[in-house]
Image: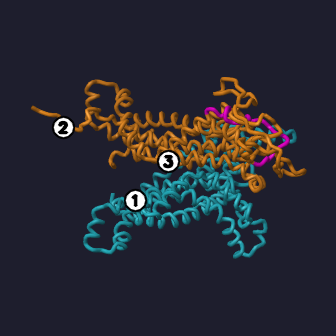
């Protein structure tokens, strides 16, 4: 068990290095940098720009820049955001926390609704409930995140029940801690619901088909033949085995969730990593883009690692391998 | 004397015929297919079906609401709309109407981008009585016409992107599985690398490598390249897995014993065996490419004005003030939804039809 976990953990290091190298290479190929626009400004002398460029090692070849960047990362620093003019570390972690918060709550909502619905649809196979769920899932799978987020925005603007974008109200700093908490929750609800709705349908369909597969297994027939109650058969025998394949799709759904969060953040003005990436992209703040991509990948890789942990915990065959 | 058993069809059905028969029985898949054929046909003849061109500005009618055709006697007529002074609220003028005519002369366009023409499927032929089926946008352009012109970009990117990335995925996956060893390791690590970055973050960093301003044709090609660069990895991984098991089968050994080249074995014997999977996967993946274009254009780094694409058109709907008062700007969202739904219907049916294990 421990060697399995250790191996998985070690595997993450070359992956993150590779991703950072790839993004760095891509950003190095990008035409122009943050100072290209500044050099058009007659108020800034060419010497100042040259000094700044030297400070950020922008004149040097990309692999030299990469080693400087890597050195900083190993010291726990994400460099300096040229566009925001503040150290990137605080910025990145604040945005990462927001994206995590959004994704985490969306995940809880999605799995919390999808699993019971999937079980219900499988148990009542071919009933109107099952058909209804299937139809809703099919429609849900086809609604693009962009449209869903825009509809939510429209809903918020038309009814005024929810804030139109943002993560906190302007007076947030003046509130008591308790009010601050409710303020955050109030801003989080709508984006999290949109993100969850996009994820829900896939998980529900998967849960249904997994449970149907296990219900066909011979040990289920055996359990029924021994006269066990239907509830006992489903929840004690079938469901436990049906959960396993679902844990494997946890990783995939996480990737979709992060991409979905990127869209929702940008439309609903949620100050997360995806929004920061776009802002940094337009400002040509290339180090910040690399930081964002690496952090998003890290979030995904850690999520997959947790999925593996859960799988190893629930399935002894993996633990013993 | 031997007699042939009765009721035996002398001609066995080919695998494709069996596939087709199974598919025909799935009504939802057929509905999806018919919708898609319709959408692609309309997009092909967009210039003819659209009453206006995609960049025609009507400076007197910003945010014109959708025109409601009425039945007057045996004629479909459209009323004239009058604007309230000072804001974008329009009212239909009762009694002041013009009939909708078919095959009417209008603005010049090029059919298929080649043949110059000026006949439109419908219209009034009078600029005072416009037919804006889905209203106009913030520049006074007809949303319906832009939707049709936009479909040319949005719908074709999906198909071309799939063709490109799946061709690469098939060949690279086939090579990786067939040769195994170091080649396999390198290719598979690269796939893992690409797949471990959340797609949109990778798309944005890829976008950064291209100059910010390009011609529409260049942007179109760029979007396809970016989406294909990300798409091939998942395909290659699955094809590699299938190749690994196919490689051990007897007919491959026979081909090798006959002295066929490695390349020929991969292309002629291994890859055709993966086709049923590939077709299903391709149909189910087209929506991701369409959505990729939508998101890029929506974020302002894809197709640029005045060209039309579904993502770009949705960009206008991001403004909550517009969204609240002029909800018809969301029409491209509905078009995306219908297209994705149709692809999912068809793909699901194809998967069931290709799954020979069930009956």
How far across and how far down the image is residue B45, in percent?
63, 32
Instruction: Chain letter for orange, please.
Output: B
Query: From what the image shows, is residue B21 above or below residue A275?
Result: above
- Mark 3: which secondary structure? helix
Q: Mark 2 or 3 closer to N-term?
A: 2
Q: Residue at the location (46% across, 43% down)?
A: B281
Toward the front, the furthest residue is B73
Query: From what the image shows, is residue A236 above or below residue B213?
Result: below
Q: Residue at the location (74% across, 28% down)?
A: B108
Q: Are marks 3 and 1 on the same chain?
A: no
Instruction: Indicate the quadrant containing the C terminus of chain A: top left, top right, bottom left or bottom right.
Output: bottom left
Which is nearer the eye, B67 or A53? Answer: B67
- Mark 1: which secondary structure? helix
How far across and how far down the image is residue A24, in percent?
61, 42
- In the picture of the structure, the residue carrying the numbered disc 1 is A210
Estimate the spatial distance between the alpha carbons at disc 1 and disc 2, rounded to whole Å: 44 Å
Q: Which residues are magenta?
A: B44-65
| Subunit that carries the residue with mark 1 | A
Q: Colour of chain A?
A: cyan
């Amino acid at each position: 068990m421990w060697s399995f976990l250790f191996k998985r953990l070690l595997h993450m290091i070359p992956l993150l290095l590779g991703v950072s190298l790839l993004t760095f290479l891509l950003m190095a190929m990008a035409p122009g940098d943050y100072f290209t626009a500044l050099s058009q400004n007659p108020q800034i002398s060419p010497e100042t720009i040259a000094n700044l460029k030297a400070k950020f090692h922008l004149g040097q070849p990309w692999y030299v820049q990469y080693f400087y960047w890597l050195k900083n990362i190993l010291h726990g620093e994400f460099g300096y955001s040229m566009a925001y003019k503040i150290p990137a570390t605080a910025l990145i972690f604040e945005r990462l926390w927001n994206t995590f918060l959004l994704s985490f709550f969306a995940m809880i909502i999605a799995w919390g609704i999808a699993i019971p619905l999937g079980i219900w649809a499988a148990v009542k196979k071919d009933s109107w409930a099952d058909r209804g769920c299937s139809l809703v899932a099919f429609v849900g799978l086809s609604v693009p995140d962009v449209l869903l987020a825009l509809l939510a925005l429209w809903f918020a603007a038309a009814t005024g029940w929810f804030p139109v974008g943002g993560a906190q109200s302007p007076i947030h700093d003046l509130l008591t801690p308790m009010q601050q908490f409710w303020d955050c929750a109030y801003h989080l609800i709508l984006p999290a619901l949109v993100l969850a709705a996009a994820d829900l349908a896939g998980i529900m369909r998967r849960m249904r088909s997994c449970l149907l597969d296990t219900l066909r297994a011979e040990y289920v027939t055996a359990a029924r033949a021994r006269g066990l109650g239907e509830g006992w058969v489903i929840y004690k025998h079938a469901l436990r085995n049906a959960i396993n394949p679902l844990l494997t799709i946890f990783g995939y759904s996480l990737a979709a969730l992060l991409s979905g969060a990127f869209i929702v953040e940008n439309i609903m003005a949620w100050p997360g990593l995806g929004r920061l990436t776009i802002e940094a992209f337009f400002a040509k703040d290339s180090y910040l883009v690399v930081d964002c991509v690496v952090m998003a990948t890290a979030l995904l890789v850690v999520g997959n690692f947790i999925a593996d942990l859960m799988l190893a915990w629930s399935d002894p065959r993996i633990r013993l391998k | 004397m031997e007699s042939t058993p009765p009721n035996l069809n002398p001609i066995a059905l080919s695998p494709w015929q069996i596939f087709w028969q199974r598919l025909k029985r799935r009504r939802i898949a057929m509905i999806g297919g018919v919708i898609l054929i319709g959408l692609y046909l309309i997009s092909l003849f967009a210039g003819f079906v659209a009453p206006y061109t995609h960049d025609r500005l009507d400076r007197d009618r910003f945010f014109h609401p959708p025109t409601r055709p009425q039945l007057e006697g045996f004629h479909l007529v459209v009323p004239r709309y009058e604007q309230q002074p000072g804001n974008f609220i329009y009212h239909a003028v009762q009694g002041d109407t013009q009939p909708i005519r078919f095959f009417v002369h209008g603005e010049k366009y090029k059919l298929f981008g080649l043949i110059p023409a000026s006949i439109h499927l419908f219209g009034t032929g009078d600029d005072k009585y416009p037919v804006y089926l889905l209203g106009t946008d913030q520049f006074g352009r007809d949303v319906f016409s832009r939707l049709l012109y936009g479909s040319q970009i949005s719908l074709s990117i999906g198909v071309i992107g799939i063709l490109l990335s799946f061709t690469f995925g098939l060949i690279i996956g086939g090579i990786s599985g067939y040769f195994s060893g170091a080649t396999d390791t390198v290719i598979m690590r690269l796939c893992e690398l690409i797949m471990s970055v959340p797609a949109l973050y990778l798309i944005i960093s890829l976008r950064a490598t291209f100059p910010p301003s390009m011609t529409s044709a260049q942007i179109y090609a760029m979007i396809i390249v970016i989406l294909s660069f990300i798409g091939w990895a998942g395909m290659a991984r699955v094809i590699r897995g299938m190749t690994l098991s196919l490689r051990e089968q007897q007919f491959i050994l026979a081909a090798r014993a006959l002295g066929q080249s490695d390349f020929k074995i991969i292309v002629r014997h291994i890859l055709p065996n993966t086709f049923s999977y590939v077709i299903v996967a391709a149909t189910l993946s087209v929506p991701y490419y369409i959505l990729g274009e939508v998101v890029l254009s929506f974020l302002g780094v894809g197709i640029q004005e005045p060209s039309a694409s579904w993502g770009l058109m949705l960009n206008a709907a991001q403004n909550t003030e517009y969204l609240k008062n002029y909800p018809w700007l969301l029409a491209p969202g509905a078009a995306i939804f219908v297209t994705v739904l149709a692809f999912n219907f068809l793909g699901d049916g194809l998967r069931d039809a290709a799954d020979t294990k069930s009956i």
